[in-house]
Image (spheres, grey):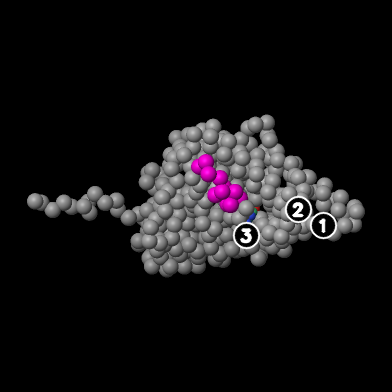
Amino acid sequence: MPEVNTKSSQRPTVRILGIESSCDETAAAVIENGRALLSNVVATQIDLHAKYGGVFPELASRQHIRTIYAVIDQALQQAHMTLEDIDAIAVTMGPGLAGSLVVGVNAAKGLALAKNIPLIGVNHLEGHIYSAWVYPADIAEPPAPPEFPIMALLVSGGHSELNLVNEHLSYQRLGSTLDDAAGEAFDKVARLLGLSYPGGPSIQKAATDGNPQAFSFPRAKTDGSFDFSFSGLKTAVLRLVKEFEKEQKALPVADIAASFQTAVVDVLLNKTLKAAHAYQAKSLLVAGGVSANRALREAFLGQTEFPVFIPAFAYCTDNAAMIAAAGYQRYMHGDRSGLEMDVQPTFPLSYING
Ligand SMILES: Nc1ncnc2c1ncn2[C@@H]1O[C@H](COP(=O)(O)OP(=O)(O)OP(=O)(O)O)[C@@H](O)[C@H]1O
Ligand SMILES: [Mg+2]
């Protein structure tokens, strides 16, 4: 009997270097075949911006310039690789701060040109979605990936969207926020309560000692659509804070934080479930910085109607592992960017088939 050559039927290993610099994290990562993470380096600028209560754009781009090559070097070293081992470089081209995006894109272009490596511009939001596919390369058993069609809730500092993902790289946006993004609401309400930046983790911490039923905050229905609105909720918190100030009473920060968090989680879970039923989704996916929220994770994992995929904590806020994972899908799809690639500060999810 002739020997069967199983090697030729095996898929070749594809290694993508991801680079992310859209906001206030400088990040690089190496991923194998779109899922197995070999390295993941994130240099956060949170301390640099904390005293301004938000990201200071010029400081952000200059800090990216200082750290980006060191971060890329570290990611390659941790993966025990050099650029010669990399099949493509995926870089965030938008959405984000223009001055910050330019640093990552130009760094990627320089390396791609010097080493003749394919370059792929990636949408940051697509990256957040693909963070749910990432797992550390050293685990024994890779987790099963989400099953299509997926109802994807994207909740971050700049976005709140429900997307139906029919297959890889195919998105249909069903709804988005009419005003503030969910993360933005966390950040603004934290400021009202005198809590530190970034607001999400501060509210989560304060809420642990609070009663989520202490105050009944509004849940915007947005006329039965799949859109979100958080400005009414934020205004309700503001009004309450003013009442306490007027009466010179101590602000019940923990109770307000817990009640606010519960209102946000309720709206996000109910809309996602409604959309998942309406579009016969087979699984739910929650991604973006707000998906790090413990109450949100517990609420989604606690429902029993759909399997739920939420990235591990390390891949919820901005990172390059997710950019490399999305870049892999783009690479397999045949997408390549030229050296004339520009940044796209406002860049909706690209609908290849949607
Ligand atoms: N535990 C948490 N609970 C709630 N919100 C959180 C938590 N951790 C982080 N966030 C929020 O996530 C947001 C940051 O997420 P992310 O880094 O994905 O946003 P961004 O990159 O600034 O925006 P975008 O991805 O829309 O461009 C902030 O608004 C932050 O308050
Ligand atoms: Mg983000």
Checking the image for residue 251, the label placed there is 1
Identity of the amino acid at label 3?
Answer: Ala
Q: Position of residue 66 (x, y in %)?
A: 56, 66
Query: Does any atom of ligand 1 lie closer than 8 Å to the CB of label 3?
Result: no
Residue at the image position 61 percent from the left and 45 percent from the top: 159
Residue at the image position 70 percent from the left and 38 percent from the top: 220
Residue 250 found in image quarter: bottom right
Closest to the observer: 243 or 171? 243
Q: Nearer the viewer, mark 3 or mark 2?
A: 2
Which segment did they paint magenta? 296-306
Q: Position of residue 302 (x, y in %)?
A: 56, 48
Dot 3 alpha-carbon crowd within 10 angstroms: few under 14, some 14 to 19, many 20 or more:
many
**Disc 2 vs disc 1: Cβ atoms closer than 8 Å?**
yes
Residue at the image position 68 percent from the left and 34 percent from the top: 222
Checking the image for residue 256, the label placed there is 2
86 to 341, vertically: above or below = below
- Does the magenta run of residues contain 303? yes
Looking at the image, residue 243 sits to the left or right of residue 351; the answer is right
Query: Does any atom of ligand 1 lie closer than 8 Å to the CB of label 1?
Result: no
* SS for dot 2: helix
Looking at the image, residue 245 sits to the left or right of residue 157; the answer is right
Looking at the image, residue 7 sits to the left or right of residue 148; the answer is left
